[in-house]
Amino acid sequence: DIQMTQSPSFLSASVGDRVTINCKASQNINKYLNWYQQKLGEAPKRLIYNTNNLQTGIPSRFSGSGSGTDYTLTISSLQPEDFATYFCLQHNSFPYTFGAGTKLELK
Amino acid sequence: QVQLKESGPGLVQPSQTLSLTCTVAGFSLTSYNVHWVRQPPGKGLEWMGVIWNTGGTRYNSALKSRLSISKDTSKSQVFLKMNSLQTEDTATYYCAREGYYWGQGVMVTVSS
């Protein structure tokens, strides 16, 4: 199984900050990497698919990059509604696997 | 409008079998795959398995011996059955279409 190591686990930031969240795969996942946002009591929401494709309706302050085993989600200027938990998902091979999550908190 | 909704018992006794239904609307199960994902309270997400539009299935090897996914396309329903439940199977269970459309989730507690 492909292991997804996500970092950091917790991130404290302020409105307007630029933040990055990383996921490292245990092997090449060929850019089959999605990013999700999850708020308490809600289902995950897909932000980015296949590394760098912004889901329709998602603000352009979210972006994704990466290749091979290393991937990054960037939020260019944090807004109050962005404080949530973020997960990466590799769907290059079965079983699909998620990162453990990054909880983004207001400083 | 694409919708998915999970339903099932909120409480299951240890060693018993969990049966969940995902009822979909706005698309045909003959055209799209449906995945099951679960999330223990306060923890991360685990991909459980998928039923392809063709009816084939693929399971997480960690659950394979206990898990079965099937569907009734005429009723727009996907079914999850998992046996030999233990307390660590306590989680919110989600069905999702291609990772984009998700149900609201159903919380299942395994307890006597």
Image (spheres, coloured by chain):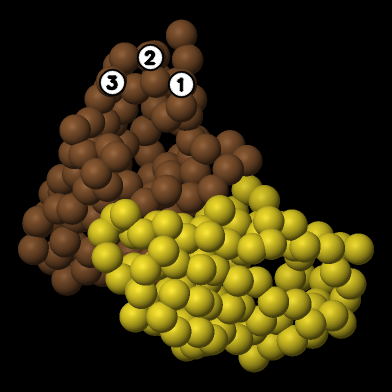
Chain colours: A yellow, B brown
Above or below, B40 against A76 in this view is above
Mark 2 to mark 1 CA distance (whole Å)? 7 Å
Q: Quadrant of residue A87?
A: bottom right
Q: Which residue is mark 3?
A: B84
Left or right: where B17 falls relative to B88:
left
Q: Sequence order check: which comes first, mark 2 or mark 1?
A: 2
Would you say residue A82 is visible in this rendering? yes
Q: Are marks 2 and 1 in contact (CB under 8 Å)?
A: yes
Q: Considering only vertical position in the picture, is A52 above or below B98?
A: below
Mark 2 is surrounded, within 10 Å at the Cα level, by few (under 14), some (14 to 19) or many (20 or more) other residues, namely: some
Q: Amino acid at mark 2?
A: Pro
Res A39 → quadrant: bottom right
Q: Which percent across, then down, holds residue A23?
A: 54, 68
Identify which residue is drawn at 24% across, 55% down.
B50
Residue B14 is tagged as 2
Q: Earlier in the sequence, mark 3 or mark 2?
A: 2
Instruction: Measuring from the top left, give residue B8's x and y in whole percent.
Output: 37, 33
What kind of element bears circle 3? loop
- The amino acid type found where label 3 is placed reads Ser
Query: Residue B87: which disc?
Result: 1
Looking at the picture, how far across and down is residue A7, in whole percent?
Answer: 64, 63
Give the chain of mark 1.
B
Q: In what element is the residue under mark 1? A: helix
Q: Residue sitting at 69 percent across and 77 percent down?
A: A20
Residues behind callouts 3 and 1 on a single chain: yes
Q: Callout 3: residue from which chain?
A: B
Chain under numbered label 2: B
Quadrant housing the C terminus of chain A: bottom right
**Is disc 1 surrounded by few (<14), some (14 to 19) or many (20+) residues within 10 Å?**
some
Q: Is residue A14 left or right of residue B56?
A: right
